[in-house]
Image (cartoon, coloured by chain):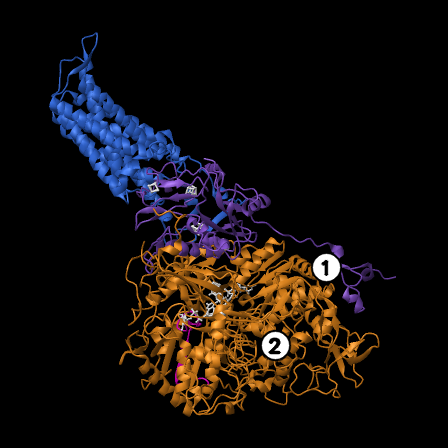
Chain colours: A blue, B orange, C purple
């Protein structure tokens, strides 16, 4: 498949944003459930949520570049019963809304307890909203992942690993960002986030390496024999019916040499996973910001490769790109 | 969105439907053109048309994009003062200037030496008019595309059975059981062939394709027989041998309807050796062509009797002595002896087809013809007065075209095919070959070329037709020394039966001044600076070459074209024609009409829209020029203008005053009450238009078959002036016509004789019986160095060079490749998709290769005329056609060196002058890695011409009429 | 989603000669019609590119000399279980209940191209100029158009096809020409493993062979016997070898 930059930005930006939001809520929970002695000012959450919001908005903006008729984008929410894309279109604003609510409540300090527990702790309003935010983020991860995972004509994508990996990578980059952000506040949460980020990055690496391995061993959904229904073993295309270009030769082919794609695999393995792991392990301050930037760039490359590795069944009909 | 079901298309704008005839190719289907707000919206096949019954092809359906082509010419153009020819520098002029410039020049030529005008036309459909113009002008230097197209097919078959494939006849697939297609890719019968082929296959018929390549039609064949290029003669002769040896021929048919049983004099010492023995006591009309004075050997009485005498039965075999001691053999016996050594094993070695396959083929043909006979309850009477209650058919049909024709051995190969068809008894019979009016015609047809220099006189029409059908050496157009009289050397001893001329040699000959220099070269609808010339690169140089004194070797070049072809750049004067949707045209009985098996059909084209800009129908231009030149046929007795314009000419012209024969056969007579012959009818055009632009004369069933010998039909045909005589047209299994030329070469002919250096050539190739020889070019080629045969094929979605200007069609064939068997790549070190050099002894091209398993490994091929010169046809300079596409013509030589007496002759069939396109041999080597990935040769990019429509935008979203 | 009526094309590979008439007649009808325009980019330049609803491809099966050349026309197959439809987020892609035709409503389409990813046949083509997805409409604007003569109410490609290799009809009606063609000639669907249940069917190559028996070569009325020359049937005989 031809990677569309709008989609690369969309998925990586909102992935990081979702991860960041989840990290904030997890941080808040940790502090609540934990010793209870250390607190973090509401501004920390508010600004963090705002950053997530900005990333989400940038992602949304990028997605508009993907649409040829963005003015009608509102229609895209209508088919949520059947279309994961439609569901994503609903989930994304929902996450944005939760980010606003979560950040806003923290900003305004509107944090009345809703429930009191026997151990003396309480479920505050922000915490409750945080849980809903996590749910929205997870839902969005699933929607976005499923958009690809349910394209059964691209065997590389049609797998639960598409959703798992997408989620893990989003979480990893979000927690890395959260760690860097927390470090800038000199927050107690820095270490927690960094540890989570490290674990998630390792998990994402494992998942992604597994999917690379899986993709390399995939058997095609069908062959030319099934595509044209001729009962022959040796079938070759001699003409695809036109000598110029077409939508089918552009949208479904990336046109980059296999060597370059292999180099990019190497690059993203290092940039998205190995390098951030080292940087996260080194810990503090600037290193964490660097970890995020490197990881983000790595994940952009990862998305590119994800598309490039997607070999659509329709390509059987378009093998003569001269 | 508007609901497609409740609203209809015709409401989108002002809608109109008009009918006319397609000319996206030479097939000439009926079309209905839908217009919306005056723009072409949809062109569909006309369901009421006999040719295509409502279907259309890829080209026809893309007519819209031709109408709106960026290559359209809309202004007469004159080469800019001071600009070099070929530099594409023109200034627009008005028609009056163009016509007076050309008129004055032609007037001077006509008054001094008319042959200084050479008028040659390409794949056009108005040879009746252009030929008449040339004759009236007085120049013999006229021909159309036939010589470089398929004249072998015309001549080889017409000299044998009085008709041919091509536009003259075809396979009766409605009734055939076995269909054998040899060397055909697309043909002039494009849609009808596809319609018939599908019906034939669905009806359970068996379809065999013999072709080095399997594409198009051959793709759906039940059996593909890959044959080595140029070797079909061997196959056909072996088939003939097997059919004779096993007795699978139709003896009765051959005896009665061919010259098989007639006795040929066999005495090498005599001057009439090889001619038929004749009875001097039988009176023979001087104008007859099939004389009743020949003998056959009666089986019962063991005596010679006049052939076809009632109650006798001839012998096909044996050798006999006439009472006067003359040794004779039946023609068939000579054929049998001729093919004796042509065994299937012999043919296997030449064709690459296993001997067993050849035998099986012969048996299949013979048994199908013999055992699956069709009998139609149609009573008819033959030329000898025998009444028949039925028409019999032997349902084996053949079709063939340029795969046989475009070789220098094509004439004899095609004669072998015609003889095979005759042995099987399939001529003008159900399920076999069927004629289309005005065929069958006498063997050979009556028109004769000018017979010597006296035929050309200043200010006088030519004596004879520019093109005709020599019957013996005395019909040749040669001077007293036997030297050619025509610029293209047609009808000379080099190519005596060149019945369609040799257009492929015109430019070279004119440039060299051999046999003489000319003044004006007038090209119409022919892309001679590109795909219709051989040796294209050199020919382009000849067009601009100068004498030492600075004069162009070809002083004046006029091009009549509708589009910015490669040739336009080489003109001194450009006459912009209209498109087929903008003009009147006729597909006339005097030319090549669209007749069906069941009777004559002719048709017209009527304008659907007004001419674009200053373009003007070329026919009008010809009428105008003819009138200005005061050519007799275009003047009244009083010496005033006779015809207002072309439509007026078509309505009122008669071949001779009061002859009643005009260009159109339908609705003649004052009020359209007559057909075929009758006075001019002022409303004839309307009547055609009302009848879907054609006139179909349905013959009675009893006139539809066996027309060579069908008394009723022949009498009707003579009465309606389709033929001059109503004598039977007997099949020439043995060709006495050819033997006469051979006798002349042997010095045994009283009349014209060839110059000495040509005697061996004429003697060798004018063999009265078919024989196989390797294409002549192979002897001039180191075939070990050039091991591969190179071919072109017609793509179904492109017409010659015309269609690259078409935004839709060019997306289908954007560039061409050299298609090779993978073993060629493996043996020469290149890959599928690699850049390679293809070299012949005469030239080379760089192009891209593509592997295919559907080709005989000794053959390589490409689609014809996809490659373009940069900037031509309104395309951008870097269009794929120019930068990746290539033209095979650069590899093909128009002449072969050292052929007779050390001199070159045309790269053509030695009998007919048919261009031997497919004889060329090549080798293929990989291009070096550091070479540009671009085809070679490249030519400087042509710029847009003044008045050319052009098209700058990068996007086109065609929607006819106003947007919703 | 089982429709009661399902219009479709049945494409007979046994007679398709690869002429591309269906390709350009489709473009011609549709570019100026309900579904148009079908724009071309670089129409006269390098690498032209355009929207076509139907393309004819060529495949070669087997190796020389046992090569089959297959011309293979392909347009939207109007799948009975079209994966392209449910994934469309806007509802622009839909399958008509009345006749099973799969269409795109250009006024709703946002041009996300997601439907095309979910078509295994590469049958959808995107119009970059208006930014909407386009595809074969089965000429829905022809087949019901009451202003056309009844026998011309067929898709443009079907009317054009010189080899009558394209049969149009309701495959749910067992009596239709299309159903009969499928039944009688082993009609099949493309990529059954894709689970799309395409409405368009293809008819395979069918061969007519000839059987020639040796005894058919020998007949009493062999013309050679009329010529008093006994027919020759290969091989030496005892006469060639014996001497007594
Ligand atoms: N679409 C389309 N139709 C056309 C034209 C066009 O340009 N485009 N041109 C028109 C014109 S002017 C003409 S003359 C006709 C020509 O019609 P065709 O004669 O069908 O044209 P060619 O493409 O020359 O096809 C020649 C075929 O012969 C095969 N062949 C070549 N050499 C040999 C051989 O030695 N033996 C055998 N058995 N086969 C051989 C080639 O592989 C090819 O398939 O088509 C007409 N129709
Ligand atoms: N290598 C190779 N070369 C070949 C062949 C081959 O098989 N292989 N085939 C040969 C054969 S059979 C033929 S017939 C020739 C064909 O050769 P041509 O007849 O020369 O070829 P076309 O490309 O048809 O070019 C005809 C010219 O007519 C112009 N034209 C088109 N429509 C109109 C119109 O309405 N009015 C006017 N005035 N002009 C118009 C076009 O612009 C073009 O310039 O090619 C021959 N060349
Ligand atoms: S076959 Fe030729 S005449 Fe007929 S529709 Fe096609 S282009 Fe036109
Ligand atoms: S029009 Fe018919 S024969 Fe021609 S390519 Fe299309 S389906 Fe095949
Ligand atoms: S491109 Fe249009 S039709 Fe396709 S999924 Fe998107 S909105 Fe639906
Ligand atoms: S062929 Fe493709 S576009 Fe057409 S209905 Fe089936 S899945 Fe959808
Ligand atoms: S049915 Fe209509 S839209 Fe579909 S391929 Fe045929 S002509 Fe094109
Ligand atoms: Mo031709």
Above or below for C114 versus B566: above
Q: Name the N-terminal-most of marks 1 and 2.
A: 1
Q: Which mark is residue B371?
A: 1
Residues rendered magenta in the picture: B513-535
Q: Is residue B762 left or right of residue B646?
A: right
Q: Please state the chain letter of the residue tagged with numbered disc 1 in the rendered image.
A: B
Dot 2, crowdedness within 10 Å: few (<14), some or many (≥20)?
A: many
What kind of element bears circle 1? helix
Taking the view exactly as shown, the residue that stands out farthest to the top is A118
- Relative side of B696 to B6, left or right: right
Residue picked out by circle 2: B441
Quarter of the image where one finds residue B956: bottom left
Can residue B829 be seen here? The reply is no
Residue C139 relative to residue C234: left or right: left
As drawn, the residue found furthest toward the right would be: C244
Which quadrant is the N terminus of chain C positioned in? top left
């Amino acid at each position: 498949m031809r990677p569309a930059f709008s989609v690369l930005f969309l998925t990586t930006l909102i992935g990081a944003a979702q991860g960041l939001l989840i990290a904030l809520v997890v941080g808040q929970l940790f502090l609540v459930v934990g010793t209870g002695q250390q607190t973090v000012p509401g501004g920390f959450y508010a600004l963090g949520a705002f950053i997530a919001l900005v990333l989400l908005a940038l992602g949304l903006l990028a997605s508009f570049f993907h649409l040829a008729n963005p003015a009608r984008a509102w229609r895209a929410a209508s088919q949520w019963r059947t279309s994961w894309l439609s569901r994503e279109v609903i989930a994304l604003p929902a996450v944005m809304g939760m980010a606003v609510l979560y950040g806003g409540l923290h900003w305004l300090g509107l944090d009345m307890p809703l429930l009191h527990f026997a151990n003396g702790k309480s479920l505050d309003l922000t915490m409750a909203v945080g849980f809903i935010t996590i749910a929205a983020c997870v839902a969005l991860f699933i929607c976005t992942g499923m958009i690809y995972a349910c394209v059964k004509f691209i065997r590389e994508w049609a797998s639960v690993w598409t959703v798992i990996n997408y989620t893990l990578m989003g979480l990893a980059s979000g927690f890395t960002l959260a760690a860097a952000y927390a470090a800038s506040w000199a927050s107690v949460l820095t270490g927690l986030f960094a540890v989570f980020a490290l674990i998630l990055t390792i998990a994402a690496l494992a998942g992604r390496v597994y999917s690379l391995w899986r993709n390399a061993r995939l058997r095609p959904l069908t062959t030319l024999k099934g595509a044209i229904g001729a009962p022959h073993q040796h079938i070759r295309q001699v003409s695809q019916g036109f000598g110029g270009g077409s939508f089918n030769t552009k949208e479904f082919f990336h046109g980059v040499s296999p060597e370059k794609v292999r180099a990019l695999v190497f690059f993203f393995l290092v940039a998205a996973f190995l390098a951030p792991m080292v940087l996260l392990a080194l810990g503090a301050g600037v290193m964490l910001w660097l970890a995020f930037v490197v990881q983000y760039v790595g994940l952009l490359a990862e998305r590119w490769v994800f598309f490039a590795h997607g070999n659509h069944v329709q390509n059987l009909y378009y093998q003569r790109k001269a | 969105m508007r609901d497609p079901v409740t609203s209809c298309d015709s409401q989108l704008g002002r809608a109109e439907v008009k009918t006319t005839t397609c000319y996206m190719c030479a097939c000439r289907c009926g079309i209905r053109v839908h217009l919306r707000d005056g723009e072409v919206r949809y062109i569909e096949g006309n369901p009421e048309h006999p040719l295509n019954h409502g279907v259309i092809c890829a080209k026809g359906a893309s007519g819209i994009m031709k109408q709106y082509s960026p290559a359209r010419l809309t202004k007469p153009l004159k080469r800019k003062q001071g600009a070099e020819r070929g530099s594409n520098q023109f200034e627009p002029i008005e028609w009056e200037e163009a016509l007076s410039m050309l008129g004055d020049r032609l007037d001077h030529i006509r008054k001094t030496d008319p042959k200084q005008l050479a008028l040659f036309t390409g794949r056009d459909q108005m040879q009746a008019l252009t030929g008449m113009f040339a004759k009236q002008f007085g120049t013999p230097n006229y021909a159309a595309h036939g010589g470089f197209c398929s004249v072998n097919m015309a001549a080889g078959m017409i000299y044998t059975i009085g008709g041919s494939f091509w536009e003259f006849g075809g396979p009766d697939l409605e009734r055939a059981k076995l269909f054998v297609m040899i060397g055909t890719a697309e043909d002039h019968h494009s849609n009808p062939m596809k319609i018939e082929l599908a019906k034939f296959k669905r009806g359970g018929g068996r379809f065999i394709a013999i072709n080095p390549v399997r594409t198009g039609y051959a793709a759906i064949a039940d059996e593909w027989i890959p044959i080595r290029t140029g070797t079909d003669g061997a196959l056909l002769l072996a088939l003939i041998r097997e059919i004779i040896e096993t007795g699978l021929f139709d003896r009765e048919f051959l005896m009665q309807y061919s010259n098989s049983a007639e006795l040929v004099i066999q005495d090498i010492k005599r001057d009439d050796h090889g001619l038929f023995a004749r009875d001097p006591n039988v009176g023979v009309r001087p104008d007859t062509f099939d004389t009743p004075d020949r003998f056959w050997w009666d089986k019962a009485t063991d005596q010679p009797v006049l052939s076809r005498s009632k109650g006798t039965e001839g012998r096909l075999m044996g050798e006999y002595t006439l009472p006067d001691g003359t040794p004779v053999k039946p023609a068939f016996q000579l054929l049998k002896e001729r093919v004796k050594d042509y065994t299937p094993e012999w043919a296997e070695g030449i064709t690459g087809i296993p001997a067993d396959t050849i035998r099986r083929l012969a048996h299949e043909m013979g048994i199908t013809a013999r055992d699956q006979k069709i009998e139609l309850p149609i009573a008819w009477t033959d030329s000898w007065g025998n009444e028949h209650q039925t028409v019999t058919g032997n349902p084996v049909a053949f079709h063939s075209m340029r795969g046989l024709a475009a070789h220098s051995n094509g004439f004899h190969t095609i004669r072998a095919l015609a003889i095979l068809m005759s042995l099987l008894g399939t001529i003008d019979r159900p399920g076999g070959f069927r004629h289309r009016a005005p065929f069958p015609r006498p063997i050979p047809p009556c028109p004769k070329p000018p017979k010597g220099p006296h035929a050309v006189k200043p200010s006088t029409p030519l004596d004879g037709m520019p093109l005709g059908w020599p019957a013996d050496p005395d019909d040749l157009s040669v001077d007293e020394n036997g030297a050619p009289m025509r610029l293209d050397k047609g009808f000379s001893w080099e190519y005596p039966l060149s019945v369609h001329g040799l257009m492929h040699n015109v430019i070279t000959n004119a440039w060299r001044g051999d046999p003489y220099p000319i003044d004006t070269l007038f090209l119409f609808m022919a892309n001679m600076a590109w795909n219709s010339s051989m040796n294209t690169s050199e020919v382009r140089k000849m067009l601009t070459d100068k004498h030492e004194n600075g004069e162009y070797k070809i002083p004046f070049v006029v091009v009549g074209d509708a589009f910015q072809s490669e040739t336009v750049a080489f003109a001194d004067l450009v006459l912009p024609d209209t498109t087929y949707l903008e003009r009147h045209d006729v597909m006339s009985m005097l030319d090549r009409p669209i007749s069906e098996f069941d009777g004559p059909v002719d048709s017209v084209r009527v304008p659907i829209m007004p001419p674009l800009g200053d373009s003007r129908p070329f026919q009008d231009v010809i009428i105008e020029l003819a009138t200005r030149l005061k050519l007799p046929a275009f003047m009244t007795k009083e010496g005033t203008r006779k015809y207002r314009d072309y439509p007026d000419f078509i309505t009122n012209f008669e071949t001779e005053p009061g002859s009643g024969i005009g260009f159109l056969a339908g609705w003649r007579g004052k009020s359209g009450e007559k057909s075929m012959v009758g006075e001019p009818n002022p409303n004839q055009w309307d009547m055609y238009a009302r009848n879907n632009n054609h006139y179909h004369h349905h013959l009675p069933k009893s006139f539809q078959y066996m027309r060579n010998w069908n008394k009723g039909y022949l009498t009707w045909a003579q009465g309606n002036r389709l033929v001059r005589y109503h004598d039977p047209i007997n099949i020439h299994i043995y060709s006495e016509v050819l033997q006469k030329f051979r006798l002349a070469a042997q010095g045994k002919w009283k009349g014209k004789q060839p110059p000495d250096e040509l005697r061996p050539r004429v003697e060798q190739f004018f063999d009265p019986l078919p024989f196989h020889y390797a294409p002549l070019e192979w002897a001039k080629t180191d075939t070990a160095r050039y091991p591969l045969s190179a071919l072109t094929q017609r793509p179904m979605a492109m017409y010659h060079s015309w269609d690259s200007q078409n935004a839709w069609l060019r997306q289908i064939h954007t560039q061409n490749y050299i298609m090779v068997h993978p073993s060629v790549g493996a043996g020469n070190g290149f890959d599928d998709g690699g850049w390679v050099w293809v070299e012949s002894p005469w030239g080379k091209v760089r192009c891209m290769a593509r592997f295919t398993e559907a080709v005989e490994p000794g053959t390589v091929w490409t689609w014809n005329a996809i490659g373009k010169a940069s900037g031509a046809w309104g395309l951008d300079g870097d269009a794929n056609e120019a930068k990746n596409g290539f033209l095979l013509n650069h590899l093909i030589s128009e002449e072969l060196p050292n052929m007779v007496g050390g001199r070159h002759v045309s790269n053509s069939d030695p009998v007919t002058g048919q261009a031997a396109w497919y004889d060329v041999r090549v080798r293929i080597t990989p291009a070096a890695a550091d070479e540009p990935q671009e085809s070679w040769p490249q030519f400087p990019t042509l710029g847009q011409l003044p008045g050319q429509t052009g098209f700058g935008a990068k996007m086109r979203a065609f929607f006819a009429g106003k947007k919703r | 989603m089982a429709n009661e009526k399902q219009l479709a094309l049945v494409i007979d590979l046994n007679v398709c000669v690869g002429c591309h008439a269906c390709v350009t007649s489709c473009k011609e009808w549709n570019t100026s019609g309900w579904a148009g325009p079908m724009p071309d980019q670089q129409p006269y330049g390098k690498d032209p590119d355009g929207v076509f609803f139907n393309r004819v491809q060529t495949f070669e099966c087997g190796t020389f000399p046992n090569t089959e050349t297959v011309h293979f026309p392909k347009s939207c197959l109007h799948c009975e279980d079209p994966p392209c439809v449910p994934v469309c987020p806007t509802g622009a892609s839909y399958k008509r209940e009345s006749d099973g035709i799969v269409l795109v409503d250009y006024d709703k389409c946002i041009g996300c191209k997601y439907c095309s990813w979910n078509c295994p046949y590469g049958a959808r083509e995107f119009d970059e100029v208006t930014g909407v997805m386009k595809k074969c409409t089965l000429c829905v604007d022809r087949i019901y158009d009451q202003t056309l003569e009844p026998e011309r109410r067929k898709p443009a490609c079907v009317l054009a096809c010189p080899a009558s290799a394209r049969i149009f009809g309701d495959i749910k009606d067992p009596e239709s020409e299309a159903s009969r063609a499928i039944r009688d000639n082993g009609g099949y669907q493309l990529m059954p493993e894709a689970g799309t249940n395409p409405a368009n069917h293809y008819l395979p190559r069918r061969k007519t062979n000839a059987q020639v028996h040796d005894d058919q070569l020998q007949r009493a009325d062999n013309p050679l016997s009329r010529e008093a020359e006994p027919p020759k049937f290969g091989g030496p005989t005892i006469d060639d070898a014996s001497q007594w």
